[in-house]
């Protein structure tokens, strides 16, 4: 079945939150007991899969959910300054006559909605689903499929991290990985998405190929 819904990750895919998140995590380093990340550290982390990043983290696994929650809350204070990824607004507007659009994110719903409203994008998306789990996006994709009465082949999931590819594969939905977010193109390619795109224009072509 041709795809009917383009399901987007938010951070690093639609919104350019990468540098803000790094700055926030560095500010929280003393409170949570880890060293701030240097530019070299950040570049090294971009080459790690989501699972490797957690395994190699020097932060207690018990602290990670609390740290991420705090980081998202802090991001909410800066959301007015967050910009869309260059070219994404045009792409999203071009897709709406052809496809239904939704967002599945581990960020806070309030942050996403504030960003969409500030950038006048809220009317483009049918829904925003938020879940705080690091590796539970596949469960939300399945919930979306069930709620919309769609088969897996009718949804394409678009994200910037290896865990986005893994979630799509677990649901047997097409996975489109974008290289302008957190994970480097090399590690995304290792996880074999259906499409690996380097520009928003290539994203349009990938979605058209699935139709």
Image (cartoon, rainbow, N blue to C red):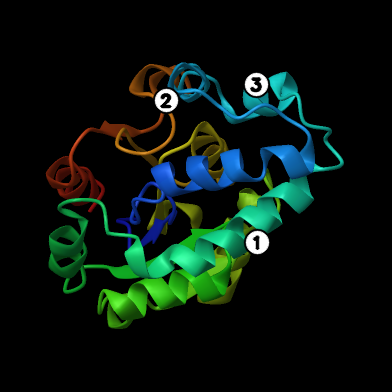
- Name which of mark 3 and mark 2 comes first in the sequence: 3
Question: Disc number at residue 188?
Answer: 2
Identify the residue position indicated by label 3 in the image. 52
Q: CA distance from mark 3 to mark 1?
A: 21 Å
Q: CA distance from mark 3 to mark 2?
A: 13 Å
Q: Residues within 10 Å of mark 1 (few under 14, many from 20)?
A: some
Residue at 43% over, 56% down:
10
| Quadrant position of the N terminus in the picture | bottom left
Identify the residue position indicated by label 1 in the image. 131
Q: Residues within 10 Å of mark 2 (few under 14, many from 20)?
A: many
Residue 188 picture quarter: top left
Observer-nearest of 152 and 82 = 82
Q: How many marks?
A: 3
Observer-nearest of 49 and 120 = 120
Q: Position of residue 203 (x, y in %)?
A: 21, 45
Front disc: 3 or 2: 3
Left of 122 or right of it: where is 55? Answer: right
Left of 8 or right of it: where is 94? Answer: left
Q: CA distance from mark 1 to mark 2?
A: 22 Å
Q: Position of residue 168 (x, y in %)?
A: 51, 44
Tag 3's secondary structure? Answer: helix
Residue at 18% over, 46% down:
200
Left of 58 or right of it: where is 151? Answer: left
Q: Is disc 3 in contact with disc 1, using a CB cutoff of under 8 Å?
A: no
Classify 74 as above or below 29.
Answer: below
Classify 205 as above or below 191.
Answer: below
Q: Position of residue 83 (x, y in %)?
A: 28, 59
Residue 143 picture quarter: bottom right
Tag 2's secondary structure? Answer: helix
Classify 75 as above or below 146.
Answer: above
The answer to whether residue 174 of the structure is visible from this angle is no
């Amino acid at each position: 079945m041709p795809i009917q819904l383009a399901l987007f990750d938010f951070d690093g895919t639609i919104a350019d939150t990468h540098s803000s998140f790094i700055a926030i995590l560095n500010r929280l380093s003393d409170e949570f007991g880890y060293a701030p990340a240097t530019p070299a550290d950040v570049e090294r982390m971009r080459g790690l899969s989501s699972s490797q990043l957690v395994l190699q983290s020097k932060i207690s696994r018990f602290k990670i959910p609390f740290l991420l929650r705090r980081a998202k809350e802090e991001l909410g204070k800066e959301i007015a300054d967050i910009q869309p990824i260059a070219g994404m607004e045009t792409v999203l507007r071009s897709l709406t006559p052809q496809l239904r659009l939704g967002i599945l994110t581990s960020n806070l719903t309030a942050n996403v909605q504030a960003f969409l409203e500030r950038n006048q994008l809220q009317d483009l998306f049918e829904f925003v689903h938020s879940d705080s789990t690091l590796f539970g996006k596949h469960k939300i994709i399945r919930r979306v499929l069930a709620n919309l009465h769609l088969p897996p082949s009718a949804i394409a999931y678009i994200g910037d991290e290896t865990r986005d590819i893994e979630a799509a594969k677990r649901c047997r939905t097409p996975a489109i990985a974008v290289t302008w977010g957190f994970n480097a193109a090399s590690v995304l390619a290792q996880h074999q998405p259906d499409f690996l795109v380097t520009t928003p224009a290539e994203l349009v072509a990938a979605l058209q190929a699935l139709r």
